[in-house]
Image (spheres, grey):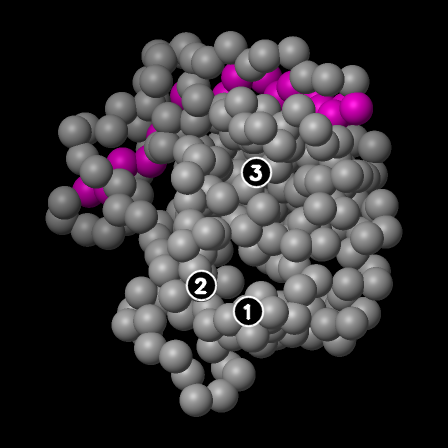
Amino acid sequence: MHGPDSTPTKSHPHYIEKQQLERLAAFQSRCLHDVFGDGKCLFRALLHSLQQQQHPLAVIHDPDSLRKALVSILDDLELHNRTWLAASDSDVAPVNQAGTLGAMLAAEAIRPPRGWSLHTWFTEMVKPHVYGDSNTLLGALLLCRLRIHVLTTQSFLGFITLKVPASFGDEYQPIYPDIWLANLADHHYFSTTVLGQNVPPQPQHAQVQQHPALPYTVLHRTHRSHRTTPHRTAPHRTAPHRNRTVPFCTTLL
């Protein structure tokens, strides 16, 4: 999914997963926006989302410079030693390094299939066609000062939410609107747009491919069971929420 055409065909093993992501996006009143898949898809998706929010960083970065900026902000030993704890940990400083940003970055770097040291991660991630991962998303939290929701079929809620914990410092807390991405199991990322929203023209360096407006099938959770059943709505209508609030998942990578 990192070749010239990142959109799977019906014969592709990820076609069904992509359809599931489209329904999860519709449940949040959003639709997927595909981007070029050449190892830069995460950075293209982030940039597209920032452009929609008119974030100040969107006008000074292209995918390559955004990659370098995210790696650069993480390459700071002072930040590595700061505590990185979820709200469930009561923001209590740990007695060892298990709750620091540096430990979080190292744990992600060594995960299969890469199995890198943190030093190797910093060396490799600046290369233009190395696909981004959870560490680069952590860098986006710090650099862009916002929360990131990632639609995924691997979560019970259909998405995970990444945010900087309060223990990390006020200077990195979110001050800009949240953004929504989507992720296939093969590491391909999508941006998303609000259903019915006109997408502004993208600068040439972004090289994004507009995905057609998507889903007319949304998921509704029944009251008698925890299964989800499809509900078909008329074309070009926003997916209904039935006046219910979708809870935020506070899972942190």
Label 3 crowd bin: few (<14), some (14–19), many (20+), radius 10 Å: many
Can see residue 6? no
Callout 3–callout 1 Cβ contact below 8 Å: no
Sequence-wise, the earlier of marks 3 and 1 is: 3
Q: Is residue 105 left or right of residue 235?
A: right
In the picture of the structure, the residue carrying the numbered disc 3 is 18
Nearer to us: label 1 or label 2: 2
**Residue 103 in picture, x, y percent from top left:** 58, 76
Residue at figure coordinates x 24%, y 29% from the top left: 241
Mark seen at residue 135: none
Nearer to us: label 2 or label 3: 2
In the picture of the structure, the residue carrying the numbered disc 2 is 168
Callout 1–callout 2 Cβ contact below 8 Å: yes
Whether residue 138 is situated above or below residue 189 in the rendered picture: below
Residue at figure coordinates x 79%, y 39% from the top left: 64
| Three-letter code for the amino acid on which mark 3 is drawn | Lys
Sequence-wise, the earlier of marks 2 and 3 is: 3
Q: Where are the magenta residues, as a range? A: 205-222
Label 2 crowd bin: few (<14), some (14–19), many (20+), radius 10 Å: some
Relative depth, front residue between 217 and 175: 175
Residue at figure coordinates x 65%, y 70% from the top left: 77
In the picture of the structure, the residue carrying the numbered disc 1 is 101
Q: Cα distance, mark 2 to mark 3? A: 35 Å
